[in-house]
């Protein structure tokens, strides 16, 4: 049951992914994403009647650490890959415009 | 505050930052208040590729203790989930939180007036970094400090069980007190280690929301950005009036998130339903699930310290102190422990718990400036200074009665209020050292 994604669905997904898409890209992606989704549909063919649902595959439980402080990165190392910094901070485009 | 036409239906969401040494999923120091920016970070809390988060056991234990203190059930199976959204202070573009298997659920807090507030859930998550908005060279910029990123955060969600602002206030103060007794967080609104959000709707049919199949209004407004208990009260008053006005017009308030703005004392729309967040929660694949055995949970209960309510019960039952005084004495854990220590010391010197309770309550002595030993020494001094010997007082009283025949006559004629004057005279003669109660008794006997 292949389902084609609508333009609105693609727009919604793009918004969730913080992508700014052109109308032409949206149309193209609607097709491509639908194709990718239908590819994953092959999984539907598996017989899972006797398989227990799980959210993890390692079989591990209760992996904890003690509340101990370990050394952190230096400020300069932390900021090393940032495009823009100021006074020890990362700088990003404004999320609030001040009057 | 509120008119009687509508009943408010209020629920709360409270975030509490735990005061563990290290962060939730990495070994960076969790302290971030007045710390040089971006000095407590590592690949895990900066969200760098390939980093592996490992949960802090103490934080989990503390979250469970908060749950126990709020009378919650503790989950035998629990896990972490990813909550996805974009924001510059969220390094990984997802927050590790808990979705369908919170550590604690179904709790309850009973208020002084008997109202029960249901606790929906108490779960564990991580804090985000901190954004600072600033103009640099005339340009608006947002600065990010990731020292707070990954600090353990406990979220407490209540049922929409509040019907008036007073209950909300009492609940929050009780919650803060419990958390401070547990010693797991400063729960300080000013420092941001306790944060509040509320949701509210109004109904003109309160009968519909009680009972086993409550029918709630078809909308709910969330209010964020509330920075003190006082502002929460103001936000409630403002929202009530705003929603009542819309309902009066025959319309329904928009389901949305609003922010409280203290400078104008208003709530302002932030996002409406059309913009509703789609967090796409899914199980955190990097952290194996948690499984707790019955005995683990039993051991946890043993870690619970005496909570305010238990202390109050002990104070009233064991020490015969009034409920009102017990509330005063349990205001903070420090005071309660101080009182208990003073009572213990007082026992040896035959100073009654009630006496100690009263001098603390009446602020005769500042408990924060005296050690329990010093307080007891002072009280002992006072009691030994006291002239409480009936014979000695009797002699002084005889003298006074002899010198005040007119007053004695007045008393015998039925003006009993002159007794106060006579006690005053006894006090004067003894420089205030007479035991007032015994003086009173002796005076009455002699005036018969
Ligand atoms: Zn870290």
Image (cartoon, coloured by chain):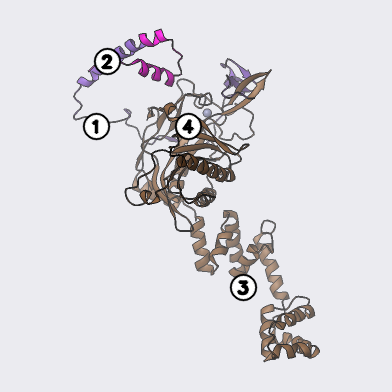
Tag of residue B25: 4
The 10 Å Cα crowd at callout 1, few under 14, some 14 to 19, many 20 or more, is: few
Tag of residue A38: 2
Mark 1 or 2, nearer chain start: 2
Residue at the disc numbered 1: A52
Chain A representation colour: purple
Tell me if A55 is positioned left or right of B179 in this view. Answer: left
Q: Tell me the magenta residue range.
A: A1-28
Tell me if B413 is positioned left or right of B253 in this view. Answer: right
- Structural distance between the alpha carbons of marks 1 and 3: 68 Å
Residue situated furthest front in the rendering: B249
- Chain containing mark 2: A
- Chain containing mark 3: B
- Structural distance between the alpha carbons of marks 1 and 2: 24 Å
Mark 4 or 3, nearer chain start: 4
- Chain containing mark 4: B
Q: Secondary structure at mark 2?
A: helix
Chain B representation colour: brown
């Amino acid at each position: 049951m292949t389902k084609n994604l609508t333009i609105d669905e693609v727009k919604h997904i793009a918004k969730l992914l913080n992508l700014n898409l052109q109308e032409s890209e949206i149309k193209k992606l609607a097709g491509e994403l639908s194709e990718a989704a239908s590819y994953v549909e092959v999984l539907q063919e598996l017989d899972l009647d006797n398989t227990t649902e799980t959210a993890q595959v390692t079989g591990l439980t209760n992996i904890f650490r003690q509340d101990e402080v370990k050394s952190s990165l230096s400020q300069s190392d932390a900021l090393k890959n940032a495009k823009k910094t100021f006074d020890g901070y990362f700088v990003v485009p404004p999320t609030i415009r001040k009057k | 505050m509120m008119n009687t036409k509508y009943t408010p239906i209020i629920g709360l969401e409270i975030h509490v930052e735990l005061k563990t040494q290290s962060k939730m999923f990495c070994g960076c120091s969790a302290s971030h208040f007045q710390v040089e920016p971006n000095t407590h970070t590592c690949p895990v809390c900066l969200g760098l590729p390939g980093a592996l988060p490992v949960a802090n056991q103490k934080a989990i234990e503390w979250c469970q203790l908060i749950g126990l203190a709020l009378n919650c059930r503790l989950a035998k199976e629990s896990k972490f989930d990813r909550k996805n959204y974009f924001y510059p202070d969220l390094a990984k573009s997802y927050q590790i939180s808990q979705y369908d298997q919170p550590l604690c659920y179904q709790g309850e807090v009973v208020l002084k007036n008997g109202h029960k507030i249901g606790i929906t859930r108490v779960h564990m998550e991580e804090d985000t970094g901190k954004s600072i908005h600033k103009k640099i060279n005339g340009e608006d910029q947002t600065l990010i400090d990731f020292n707070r990123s990954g600090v353990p955060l406990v979220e407490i969600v209540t049922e929409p069980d509040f019907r008036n602002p007073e209950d909300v206030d009492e609940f929050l103060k009780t919650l803060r007190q419990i958390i401070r007794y547990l010693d797991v967080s400063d729960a300080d609104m000013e420092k941001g280690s306790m944060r509040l959000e509320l949701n509210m709707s109004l109904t003109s049919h309160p009968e519909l929301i009680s009972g086993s199949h409550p029918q709630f209004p078809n909308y709910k407004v969330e209010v964020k950005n509330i920075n003190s208990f006082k502002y929460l009260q103001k936000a409630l008053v403002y929202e009530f009036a705003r929603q009542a006005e819309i309902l009066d017009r025959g319309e329904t308030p928009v389901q949305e998130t609003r922010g409280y703005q203290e400078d104008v004392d208003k709530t302002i729309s932030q996002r409406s339903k059309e913009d509703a967040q789609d967090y796409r929660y899914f199980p955190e694949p990097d952290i194996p699930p948690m499984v707790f055995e019955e005995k683990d949970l039993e051991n946890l209960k043993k870690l619970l310290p005496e909570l305010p309510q238990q202390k109050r019960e002990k104070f009233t039952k064991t020490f015969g102190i009034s409920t009102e005084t017990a509330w005063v004495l349990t205001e903070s854990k420090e005071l309660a422990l101080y009182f208990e220590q003073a009572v213990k010391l007082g026992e040896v010197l035959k100073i009654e718990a009630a006496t100690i309770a009263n001098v603390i309550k009446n602020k005769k002595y500042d408990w924060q400036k005296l050690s329990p030993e010093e307080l007891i020494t002072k009280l002992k001094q006072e009691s030994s200074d006291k002239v409480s010997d009936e014979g000695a007082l009797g002699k002084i009283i005889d003298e006074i009665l002899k010198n005040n025949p007119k007053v004695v006559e007045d008393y015998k004629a039925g003006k009993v209020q002159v007794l106060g004057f006579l006690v005053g005279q006894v006090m004067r003669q003894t420089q205030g050292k007479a035991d007032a109660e015994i003086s009173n008794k002796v005076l009455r006997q002699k005036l018969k």
